[in-house]
Amino acid sequence: WLLTSGGANQAVSAALAVLVIACPCALGLATPTAMMVASGRGAQLGIFLKGHRALEATRAVDTVVFDKTGTLTTGRLTVSAVTAEQGWDGEEVLALAAAVEAGSEHAVALAISASAPHHAPVEDFRSIPGRGVSGVVGGRTVRVGKPAWIAASGLSPTLTAARRTAESRGETVVFVEVDGRPCGAVAVSDTVKDSAADAVATLHARGLRTVLLTGDNPASAAAVAGQVGIDEVIADVLPDGKVDVIEQLREQGRVVAMVGDGINDGPALACADLGMAIGRGTDVAISAADVVLVRDDLTTVPVALGLAAATMRTIRVNLVWAFGYNVAAIPIAAAGLLNPLIAGAAMAFSSFFVVSNSLRLRNFGSVMNR
């Protein structure tokens, strides 16, 4: 302005107006304010967001993968039936199975060991992930595990029929083998969470695909999927195989959110685009996830996705406003058409808009109200 014959007052006024307008307050508040408000609202709803990755991944999520035991079901399993081979007693079979399973932390193992609390000590205990456990009880080698693992020794029609009956009811079956020969089968039942069907229905209403991914047998998995409304089932998957499945889904172009709670789910949660852990799950699952659902309520899954998406929308609006405000106002200030006092008021209003827009997230309600 001085070079173009403008007066000193005009030059100083224009310079001050430009400096005030260009103050990056709104730009600096755009993201952290929205994140802070979203984190607080998420805590009220039982959702813990672990940062930007959780927010960014939700923008394109189109597939939600659920674990079964402890995620879709309560995880509070109970022994529903014991089938013994000829020459064996059901109580003896259960006692041997409980003795070996007492060394495992798997939900099925806990149910079996709890059903026979007074059992013999076990020696040389071994756990084979995704298959079962083994040990020496009273000088006899006992193995308890999946049918496919025990079936190598051959199964009688009695055990085969017991397995089919239990699996048709959605129950999990493990076989018991003593000194290389199957001696019985133990069926364990679980209950589907009341919130599971509503959560799946809400996700479907949003156009998301759902998948049940489990190490359980296909018949039991299909029975649970039918109860909650999941159409796609991938069953009988070993812990390491869950990661392969997630990677295959991503290679197909899907953006995957994984919901789980157990130790076996940790690698899959870390591999997914968005990992969501049930708060009462294992430390491994919680540390690997991007979102922790504090409440054991699956309806918080679509709520968490909705909150993250709403937060991203808020951040984008804030940034567009902050950039647009500067782009539009700086040329006006440079042209000497903006009084510094008005520029100060405009700058304050810009920051006020960003903060107010972020505070709208405090009113984020349930999925049914969105």
Image (spheres, helix red, strand yellow):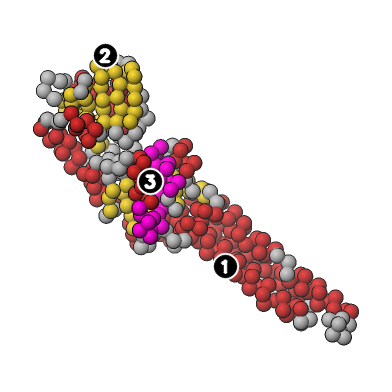
Where residue 143 sits: x, y (%)?
26, 25
Residue bearing the label numbered 3: 243
Determine whether 62 is above or below 140 in the image: below
Q: Which residues are magenta?
A: 248-271
Determine the CA span between mark 1 and mark 3: 36 Å
* 249 lies left or right of 5: left
Of the two numbered discs 3 and 2 on the same chain, state the one appearing first in sequence.
2
Q: Secondary structure at mark 2?
A: loop
Residue that numbered label 1 is attached to: 317
Instruction: Examine the image and state in which quarter residue 206 appears.
Output: bottom left
The x, y position of residue 126, in whole percent, is 34, 25
Could you tell me which secondary element the residue under label 1 belongs to? helix
Q: Earlier in the sequence, mark 1 or mark 2?
A: 2
Residue placed under numbered mark 2 in the picture: 139
Q: Earlier in the sequence, mark 1 or mark 3?
A: 3
Q: Residues within 10 Å of mark 3 (few under 14, many from 20)?
A: many
Residue 84 circle label: none
* Residue occupying the point 62% across, 62% down: 30
Q: Is residue 119 at least partly visible in the picture?
A: no
